[in-house]
Amino acid sequence: MSSAALACPAGTQPMTRVDFFFGGDVGAPGGVPDAEWQRFVEMEVTSRFPDGFSVADVDGQWRNAMGMVEAERSKNLIVIVRDVRAYASRITSLRAAYRARFQQQSVLFSETPLCAGF
């Protein structure tokens, strides 16, 4: 269901929540250092999503190519946008920037239609 198809209550409108999950296992003890993460946010995230976003520390788990379960500290970046199609290139380029900077295999992201109001 696209966010435009939602019937939203008064005071809200159809939007999309975009979640990014940035893995923290980058070879350094303790994962991505706080200063490096903050630099990434300032240089890469803020310019793409200047209207705002939230970041949460999360514990992630995934199965690697050899079938082993791996756990790592991660960052969940949450962005709410009105028109997700208008942000498609920003989403793609942000994922690529993180993969390149921190030598990651992938960056998980998801899109969820919702009703939101500010």
Image: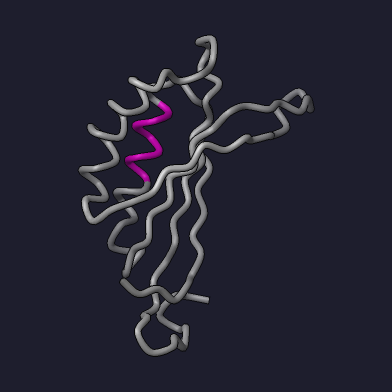
Point 42% across, 18% down: residue: 33
In percent of width and height, residue 108 lies at 53, 42
The quadrant of the image that shows the C terminus is: bottom left
> Residue 117 occupies which quadrant of the picture?
bottom left
Q: Is residue 110 above or below residue 82?
A: above
Q: Is residue 91 above or below residue 17?
A: above
Point 32% across, 68% down: residue: 83
Point 47% across, 75% down: residue: 2
Comparing 2 with 72, the one in front is 72
In reply to whether residue 18 is colored magenta, the answer given is no
In percent of width and height, residue 98 lies at 39, 30
- What colouring style does the render use? one colour
**Taken as a whole, is the magenta stretch helix, strand or loop?**
helix
Point 47% across, 83% down: residue: 6
Q: Is residue 50 above or below residue 34?
A: below
Comparing 19 with 104, the one in front is 19
How many labels were placed on the picture?
Answer: 0
In percent of width and height, residue 103 lies at 45, 20
Comparing 110 with 17, the one in front is 17
In percent of width and height, residue 17 lies at 44, 61
Q: Is residue 118 above or below residue 95?
A: below
> Residue 43 occupies which quadrant of the picture?
top left
In reply to whether residue 96 is colored magenta, the answer given is yes
Comparing 22 with 63, the one in front is 22
**Residue bounds of the magenta highlight:** 92-99
